[in-house]
Amino acid sequence: MVAAHASRKVIRLRGAPHQKAPRFLVGLELTTGATGLVGGLLLAMRPDGSLLNADLRVLADSPFPDWRLPGLLLACLVGGGFLLAGGWQWRGRRGAAWLSMLAGLGLVVFEAAELSWLGFQPLEAVFAVVGLAVVVLPGVQVCTTDGAADSDSRPRRRRHCQPVRAVAKP
């Protein structure tokens, strides 16, 4: 007797081991990480903001007396987080998509906090869009599980995954 089970679709995030990482995503993450790291270190090295022409008056209504702590936060959270996510994605490690999405979400939260402390600055909007892109770019796959039966009549499941763009519309 052959057991038949209805197919069902499951949406899951990409990030399986040994999967080729999208070049654009890796490039975006590594570039964002490098700029965050360098910018943050320059702010921390000269807390008056002189190395980046950052005006101390911008911090007047913020909880920061100078650029040292914002620079360290930028270097560690954004720079370190995006370099880690980009390296993980480049190597195709398990959980790379989740890590990328976490880094992207972290950047959006970082920029929202910066907006509330410092007011609007155009670079905040640019990096918020970068963060949103990194949340979306890892993509999703639609996986179909079928209930094909083994020769001994035990149901076994096979998983077939493909990118959403390649799935036929119903």
Image (cartoon, helix red, strand yellow):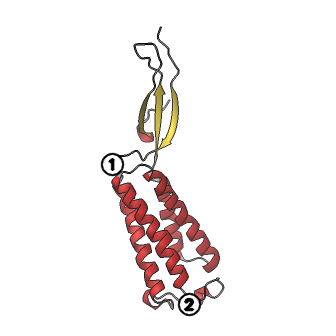
Going 49% across and 52% down the picture, which residue do you hit?
98
- What x and y, as percent, mark residue 51? 43, 89
Q: Which sits in the foreground, 11 or 120?
A: 11
Query: What residue sits right under mark 1 in the picture?
Result: 20
| Disc 2 + disc 1, Cβ < 8 Å | no
- What x and y, as percent, mark residue 17? 37, 46
Label for residue 38?
none
Going 37% across and 60% down the picture, which residue do you hit?
87
Q: Is 20 above or below relative to 169?
A: below
How many residues crowd around disc 2 within 10 Å: few (fewer than 14), some, or many (20 or more)? some
Q: Which sits in the foreground, 27 or 94?
A: 94
* Between discs 2 and 1, the one toward the N terminus: 1
Numbered disc 1: secondary structure: loop
Going 64% across and 75% down the picture, which residue do you hit?
116
Q: Is 152 above or below relative to 45?
A: above
- What x and y, as percent, mark residue 26? 37, 59
The tally of labels here is 2
Q: Which sits in the foreground, 111 or 38?
A: 38
Query: What residue sits right under mark 2 in the picture?
Result: 56
Callout 1 amino acid: Lys
Going 66% across and 85% down the picture, which residue do you hit?
61
Numbered disc 2: secondary structure: helix
Q: Is 13 above or below relative to 108?
A: above
The picture quadrant where one finds residue 166 is top left
Callout 2 amino acid: Leu
